[in-house]
């Protein structure tokens, strides 16, 4: 069995790492270069760098910050935010990224996924899915645990989680794989920053629908949440921010606990 990956996430805006709750109320969480170096020392398997306001501001990714971050790590680095064209992908990889994360541009121009995979290989293309549960007037869907209802739906949001679409998240996950994505980064907007646990049902549904790795994102508060995402959610990796940025735990501590529970991790 392949080792499960533990991935810290750097949400960056104006050159600083920030962390919010449900994409709002952002707190400063430090310098991205310093944070990256620390997570490399802690034994993180990979690192995700997301320029979270690039799409909203209609600008390119901050490649100078990406380059300085890449210099500090010796683990795979995924970079997202503001990547709209093949040239954007090329420039981001040249700046030191190993993979690029495509979200808004993938919805607006799905062919970018195909073209990116053809030019640079599927292993370089991560499709990020920001998903939110569709409100149901006849039922409270605010819970995030496993639910028996087959008709629960999630919709994709774009532009850093500021604009809703009518795209079904599960259907989009399948299409992204068919178009050449090598990996999916799935974030529950309902759970993001709450530290109350991942949306396990969303993760399980997507993991069972595709044959490429799925990274769980949104809601990590402790090792139990990560364990659930990797087992019940059937994910290949877990991403977290708050619990690492504010020193509630370390990557090493998480790996040690997961290993004690029988989860294969790289120690």
Image: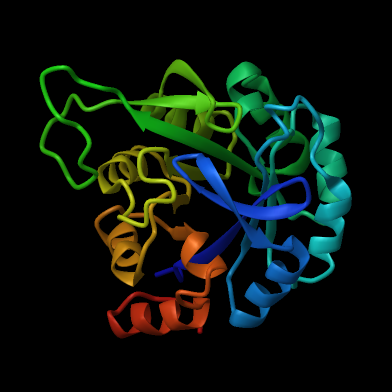
Q: Residue furthest top?
A: 166
Residue 236 image point, x, y percent: 43, 58
Q: Quadrant of residue 59?
A: top right
The reply to whether residue 239 is visible in this rendering is yes
Q: How is the image coloured?
A: rainbow
Quadrant holding the N terminus: bottom left
Residue found 19% across the figure and 32% down from its top: 141
Residue 249 image point, x, y percent: 46, 77
Residue 246 is left or right of residue 15, and the answer is: left
Residue found 44% across the figure and 41% down from its top: 22
Residue 261 against residue 60 in the figure, above or below: below
Residue 4 is left or right of residue 51, and the answer is: left
- The residue closer to the viewer here, 235 or 70, is 70
- The residue closer to the viewer here, 96 or 176, is 96
Residue 4 image point, x, y percent: 44, 67
Residue found 40% across the figure and 40% down from its top: 210
- The residue closer to the viewer here, 91 or 118, is 91
Residue 208 against residue 10 in the figure, above or below: above
Residue 240 is left or right of residue 30, and the answer is: left
The total of numbered circles placed on residues is 0
Residue found 34% across the figure and 61% down from its top: 230
Q: Quadrant of residue 68?
A: bottom right
The reply to whether residue 95 is visible in this rendering is no
Residue 105 image point, x, y percent: 66, 25
Q: Quadrant of residue 254?
A: bottom left
């Amino acid at each position: 069995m392949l080792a499960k990956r533990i991935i810290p996430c750097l949400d960056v805006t104006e050159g600083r790492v920030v962390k919010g709750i449900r994409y709002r109320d952002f707190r400063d969480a430090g310098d991205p270069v310093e944070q990256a170096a620390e997570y490399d020392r802690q034994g993180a398997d990979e690192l995700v760098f997301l320029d979270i306001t690039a799409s909203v501001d209609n600008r390119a990714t901050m490649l100078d910050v990406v380059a300085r971050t890449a210099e500090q790590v010796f683990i795979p680095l995924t970079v997202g935010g503001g990547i709209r064209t093949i040239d954007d992908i090329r420039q981001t990889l040249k700046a030191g990224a190993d993979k690029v994360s495509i979200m808004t541009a993938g919805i607006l121009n799905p062919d970018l996924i195909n073209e990116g995979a053809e030019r640079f290989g599927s292993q370089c293309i991560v499709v990020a899915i920001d998903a939110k549960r569709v409100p149901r007037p006849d039922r409270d869907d605010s819970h995030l645990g496993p639910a028996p209802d087959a008709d629960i739906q999630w919709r994709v949001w774009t532009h850093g989680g500021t604009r809703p679409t009518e795209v079904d998240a599960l259907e989009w996950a399948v299409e992204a794989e068919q178009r050449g994505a090598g990996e999916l980064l799935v974030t529950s907007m309902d759970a993001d920053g709450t530290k109350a646990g991942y949306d396990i049902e969303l993760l399980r549904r997507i993991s069972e629908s595709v044959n490429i790795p799925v990274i769980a994102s949104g809601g990590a508060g402790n090792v139990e949440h990560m364990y659930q995402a990797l087992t019940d959610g059937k994910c290949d990796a877990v991403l977290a921010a708050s619990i690492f940025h504010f020193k509630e735990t370390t990557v090493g501590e998480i790996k040690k606990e997961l290993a004690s529970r029988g989860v294969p991790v790289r120690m």
